[in-house]
Image: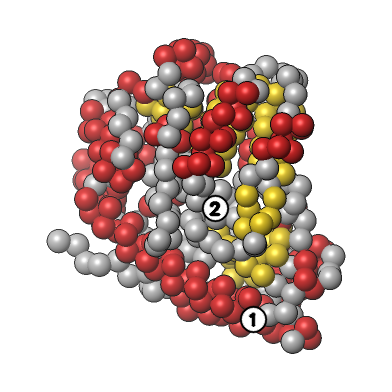
Amino acid sequence: MSLPPDFDELINRVGTHSDKWDEMERIFGVSPAEGLPMWVADMDFRPPHSVQKALEDMAAVGVYGYWGDNRDYFAAISWWMQNRHGWTVEKDWIFTTHGLVNGAALCIDAFTRPGDGVVLMVPVYHAFARVIKAAGRTVVECPLKTVDGRYEMDFEAWDRIVDSKAKMLILCSPHNPGGRVWSVEELKAVAEFARRHDLVLVSDEIHHDLVMPGHKHHPMATVTDYPVVMMSAATKTFNIAGTHSGNVIIADPDLRARFAARMAALGISPNSFGLAMATAAYSPEGAAWVDALCSYLDGNRKLFDAGVNAIPGLRSMPLEATYLAWVDFSGTGMTATEIHTRVEAGAKIAANHGETFGSGGETFMRFNLATPRVRIADAVARLARAFGDLQ
């Protein structure tokens, strides 16, 4: 029996090729010696012992050849989806990609052509727009509306925006940023919206395990008979993003055949470390670890929100899932540049700029809360000082 996870442990990641820690000075001008990295979405926590043991077992053999026999890997995915999400997944539906940004890019390549439109509900995860544009497709922005301080869908407005050039919709569920857990009714409405406009529906559900107490994630594939391309991964859940592994899961035979053809044409196959770590993570030990993690993240959320919402002009959107707080600074009356300067040069915190998430994000910043709680308390104190003249 492994020891309970210690999420309060302060792990020194500086100099370990950590994007989060070792790149923040170059990107944000915030030194890791005195600053807090609250930008890129990985956690400052060790994964479950089962994941570490899987790597140790591989190292003990000491031969790192081609990986074969994926039965345990497919079984682990099916077990996890059935037991954690009530979703039955057949092994023949599963494609393993180099992470879900790669998965999204492959969907764009397989299901659209240059010049086609891809619909995004903005503001949304910035990598979607990046790969859409890089592929020579057009981003079709459908703005979310804010109701009582949280995001809601606006199909009436979106029906006027989307035309016949749009061929695909990428849904972010749970939503990043904003942390919404979409209801069954909302998800059904998304599927009907896709049906009305004849859109290939891709549902990125990488944050599906990171749900706050009192909320429940519903896989899109379980709520509609409309064909769905599902994207999931163990990487965000278990903090193993460096493996660059993700799964595109397609039940529909036609969509599956089209995706398989592009995978074959591009010669894409997974790496052994990602397969071994995901197999070990999707286990009863991993499930217990995730339960403890979500409870801890909920505590961080409460501490962060209480502190930020006490600062005049700042408002943190209620977080139902993910560990990414979405803070609105519009009440300060400041420009985005002024806000960034206070956060980075004043509070010495590296956080994502809201405008990178698309229209509607201009007055926001995104803060990563997946770090020991002492750092959350420090971040709140720093922000209070940086905006202290507003008190």
Crowding at dot 2, Cα within 10 Å, few <14 / some 14-19 / many 20+, comes out as: many
Residue 98, horizontal then vertical, whole percent: 48, 34
Left or right, 163 with respect to 8, comes to right
Residue 58 image-quadrant placement: top left
Picture disc at residue 180: 2
Image: 139 above or below 175: above
For the point 26% across and 57% down, the residue is 288
Looking at the picture, tell me which residue is in the foreground, 173 or 342: 173
Helix, strand or loop under label 2: loop
Residue 59 image-quadrant placement: top left
Helix, strand or loop under label 1: loop
Asked whether residue 192 is in view, the answer is yes
**Which residue type does callout 2 highlight?**
Arg
* Image quadrant containing the N terminus: bottom left
Image: 240 above or below 330: above
Image: 267 above or below 370: above
**Which residue type does callout 1 highlight?**
Ala
For the point 65% across and 62% down, the residue is 149
Looking at the picture, tell me which residue is in the foreground, 161 or 298: 161
Crowding at dot 1, Cα within 10 Å, few <14 / some 14-19 / many 20+, comes out as: few
Picture disc at residue 310: 1
Residue 13, horizontal then vertical, whole percent: 48, 64
For the point 45% across and 30% down, the residue is 224
**First in sequence: mark 1 vs mark 2:** 2
Looking at the picture, tell me which residue is in the foreground, 154 or 352: 154
Left or right, 189 with respect to 85, comes to right
For the point 71% across and 31% down, the residue is 159
Asked whether residue 122 is in view, the answer is no
